[in-house]
Amino acid sequence: MTAQINQEERIVVLDTETTGIDPKQGHRIVEIGCVEMINRQLTGKTYHAYINPLFQMEQEVIDVHGLTNEFLADKPLFNQVADEFIEFIRGAELVIHNAKFDVGFMDHEFGMTKRGLPMTADICQVTDTLFVSKDEFGSPKTLDFLAKHYRVDGLIDRTYHGALIDAQLLAYVYIEMTRKQATFNLSADDGQGSGDANAIRRLNADRPALKVVRASADELIAHQERLAVVEKKGGAPIWPK
């Protein structure tokens, strides 16, 4: 039987590259990169698209992500990839670093299609790791800072800041950043299928007796010698015997 995956357990880590910083000035998305995680584990499933912005980028922008006007000239328009993009992120928890920027561009692009497409907030929940980093470190931190802090910066070659590359890096950062929030599955089974995590788990009375392994004479001598060293250094052993 195939295990059913709750939508709440699906995370999509996302990043975009754009022609500038403000969609109101006509700037557009040129690349989308998404990485899927299930139960905080990378699945290997991704979504990646280059997009023709119908906009001539300045060299300063090209130097950041390495995508030239010539390279993007034959790529699809956003309207042509919008449906498959929405389908990939639909119902997931969307993890973005500085989500206000990416979501602003996404919503602008959705609106420009003139097809009544939903806005990002109507498609999925958004978690901004920029805000998470503020809670963790007292001030917002860049993705580069977080990658170095959590020692995952060497896992990805970031010669250029490509959307899929940065999404993959952010996925590693997110796993480390939220590791302490992960909990072990301590749900108990009382043997009757109740699955109540608070139920008392009773041991089977017919279980075999536990084997007791006692220390050998040599091990006891070595133990006493170690305690003597501890006492000599000013310690007070709490297990003298």
Image (cartoon, helix red, strand yellow):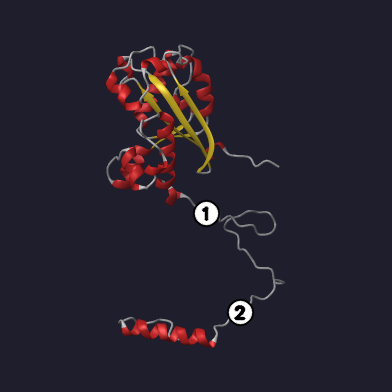
Which quarter of the rendered picture does the N terminus lie within? top right
Residue drawn at x 53%, y 22% is 84
Q: Mark 2 points at which residue?
A: 212
Residue drawn at x 62%, y 63% is 201
| Residue 226 at x, y percent in the picture | 41, 82
| Residue 61 at x, y percent in the picture | 30, 22
| Residue 44 at x, y percent in the picture | 53, 37
Image quadrant of residue 145? top left
Q: Name the residue under label 1.
A: 184
Q: How crowded is mark 2: few (under 14 residues within 10 Å), some or many (20 or more)?
A: few
Q: Are marks 2 and 1 in contact (CB under 8 Å)?
A: no
Residue 21 shows up from this direction? no
Residue 188 shows up from this direction? yes
Q: Which of 222 and 1 is in front in this view?
A: 222
Side (left or right) of 199 relative to 33? right
Side (left or right) of 89 relative to 162? right
Compared to residue 138, the image places residue 233 above or below, namely below
Secondary structure beneath dot 2 equals: loop
Residue drawn at x 58%, y 39% is 6
| Residue 129 at x, y percent in the picture | 37, 38
Name the kind of residue labelled 1 in the image.
Answer: Phe
Compared to residue 145, the image places residue 216 above or below, namely below
Q: Nearer the viewer, residue 79 or 94?
A: 79
Side (left or right) of 135 relative to 121? left
Residue drawn at x 49%, y 12% is 115
